[in-house]
């Protein structure tokens, strides 16, 4: 049988993909992170589904659940918040399953940074302003960052930066980005993107930290820094230009 690593989306229950929902509706076993995955999604599980909250489980215990289900001949819906490709801890689970010969499939989901951009009403790649997006985090109490991936080094490019798992260190984030971006650089924080209790803060590197502290935001938030957040004067994209030769194909 198969383990399906399903991106459950950023928070709103209706932001799961159709494929993810179909897998969820047929799997007799479902593992989910209770602190992040909306409870409404679990209502889509078939009657009698074995529901396992992984919030208090370590990696060995999670793998044991997956293997037990596989040996019993059951498919597993393994729900991860956001999209499995970014900061999901899916890689080590897949590595274990590869070793054990347990088949799996990854079902993409809506990532938190996309939900944050939607809440801000902004495109993160604006012609002539910013065409590169850096997705990163800070180390804090998590796994140390690889050499050369510190904020000062990454920020030297001036590219739009999106930070996950970093809002608790907002003061340090600002301090490390100020030399490259400047105090007047637009910055935003979106907490609990797409949920009913979503919070959106807009400002600059000069004041965003104070806004975060005042709002009491400590987790489940995305930080966005870059000139694209306030860009209004920029050239139209070549994608829909009247001068573009559409015989060459493309959207």
Image: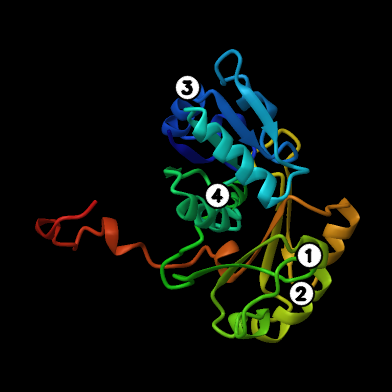
Categorize mark 3 by other alpha carbons within 10 Å: few (<14), some (14-19), many (20+). some
Q: Which numbered disc covers residue 174?
A: 2
Query: Can you give x and y, in whole percent of width and height, for residue 28 in the image?
Result: 54, 23
The reply to whether residue 8 is visible in this rendering is no
Residue identifier under label 4: 111
Residue identifier under label 1: 208
Disc 1 and disc 3 in contact, CB within 8 angstroms: no
Secondary-structure class at tag 1: helix
Residue identifier under label 3: 26
Disc 1 and disc 2 in contact, CB within 8 angstroms: yes
Query: Can you give x and y, in whole percent of width and height, for residue 96 in the image?
Result: 54, 54
- Between disc 1 and disc 4, the foreground one is 4
Secondary-structure class at tag 4: loop
> What residue is at 18 percent from the left and 62 percent from the top?
244
How far is mark 4 from mark 2, CA to CA?
A: 23 Å
Query: Left or right: where does residue 71 sit relative to residue 248?
Result: right
Q: Which is more N-terminal, label 3 or label 2?
A: 3
């Amino acid at each position: 049988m198969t383990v399906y690593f399903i991106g459950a989306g950023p928070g709103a229950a209706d932001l799961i993909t159709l494929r993810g929902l179909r897998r969820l509706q047929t799997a007799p076993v479902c593992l989910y992170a209770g602190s992040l995955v909306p409870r409404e999604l679990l209502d889509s599980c078939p009657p009698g589904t074995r529901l396992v909250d992984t919030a208090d489980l370590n990696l060995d215990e999670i793998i044991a659940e997956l293997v037990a289900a596989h040996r019993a001949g059951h498919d597993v819906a393994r729900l991860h918040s956001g999209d499995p490709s970014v900061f999901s801890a899916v890689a080590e689970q897949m590595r274990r399953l590869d070793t054990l010969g347990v088949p799996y499939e990854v079902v993409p989901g809506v990532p938190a940074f996309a939900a944050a951009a939607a809440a801000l009403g902004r495109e993160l790649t604006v012609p002539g302003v910013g065409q590169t997006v850096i997705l990163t985090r800070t180390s804090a109490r998590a796994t140390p960052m690889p050499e050369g991936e510190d904020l000062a080094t990454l920020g030297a490019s001036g590219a739009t930066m999106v930070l996950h798992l970093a809002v608790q260190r907002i003061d340090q984030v600002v301090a490390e980005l100020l030399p490259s971006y400047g105090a007047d650089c637009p910055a935003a924080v979106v907490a609990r993107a797409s949920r009913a209790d979503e919070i959106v803060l807009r400002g600059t590197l000069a004041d965003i930290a104070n806004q975060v502290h005042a709002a009491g935001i400590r987790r489940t938030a995305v930080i966005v820094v870059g000139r694209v957040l306030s860009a209004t004067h920029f050239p139209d994209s070549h994608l829909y230009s009247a001068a573009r030769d559409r015989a060459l194909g493309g959207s």
